[in-house]
Amino acid sequence: MNTTSPMHVVLALAASFALVSCAQESGTADDPEPTSSASSTSSAETPASATVELTADGSTAGKCAMPSAETLAGFDTAFEGTVTSLDDGTATLVVDQWFAGGDGAETVTVTTPSELLEDLLLAVEFQPDRTYLVSADGGRVTLCGFSAEKSPELEALYQSAFAS
């Protein structure tokens, strides 16, 4: 007699997907080059008033690990910003401080996942007039605690990762 209900199967599949899709691991030789639907330009090509475009979709496979300053320091983009608008799945943030990348851009737009995917992937749920610490690699916002609403703990992690 099978005692597994359809709900248990759905929850098990969702949990498996979350573990596999939460965030990419950095620094391993076997990882393929990151892919990005965001435009990427070199620092010489990005004017200070340009907008950086990022995607928060969890499409890169990986697994969650405890966020560390060492891992955070390896991401190519990191900033503190305040959400000024949310429009059709896109959050616009005014940059308060760049830690890495960005080349002086004043704003960042982040294409956000659906609410269901946000919950499943532990993605950032951007809200207007709130300040966030956001990191990204290859044009994709990092998940699993590396990007979130600003808190003393996350701020300390960013300061440690990007102390110069």
Image: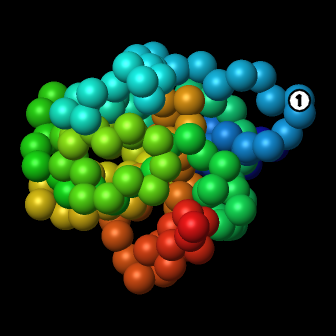
Q: Residues within 10 Å of mark 1 (few under 14, many from 20)?
A: few
Q: Amino acid at mark 1?
A: Asp
Identify the residue under disc 1: 30
Percent across and percent down for residue 8 are 62, 48
Residue 21 x, y percent position in the rendering = 63, 38
Q: Position of residue 159 (x, y in %)?
A: 51, 72
Q: Nearer the viewer, residue 154 or 14?
A: 154
Q: Residue furthest right?
A: 29
Total marks placed: 1
User: Image height check: is 146 above or below 164?
Assistant: above
Please, is residue 73 above or below residue 47 in the view? below
Q: Is residue 32 visible?
A: yes
Q: Which picture quadrant has residue 44? A: top left
Taking the spot 67% from the left edge, 40% from the top edge, the residue there is 24
Residue at the image point whose x is 45% and y is 56% from the top: 99
Tag 1, which secondary structure?
loop
Q: Quadrant of the C terminus?
A: bottom right
Q: Is residue 154 above or below residue 136?
A: below
In the foreground, 143 or 156: 156
On the image, the x and y values in percent for residue 7 come to 55, 45
**Residue 9 visible (yes or no):** no
Specify the quadrant that holds the N terminus. top right
**Farthest bottom residue?**
152
- Residue shown at 67% from the left, 67% from the top: 68
Q: Residue at 24% x, 63% y: name it.
A: 131
Q: Residue furthest front?
A: 44
Which residue is more in the foreground, 44 or 97?
A: 44
> Is the image coloured rainbow, by chain, by secondary structure, or in one colour?
rainbow
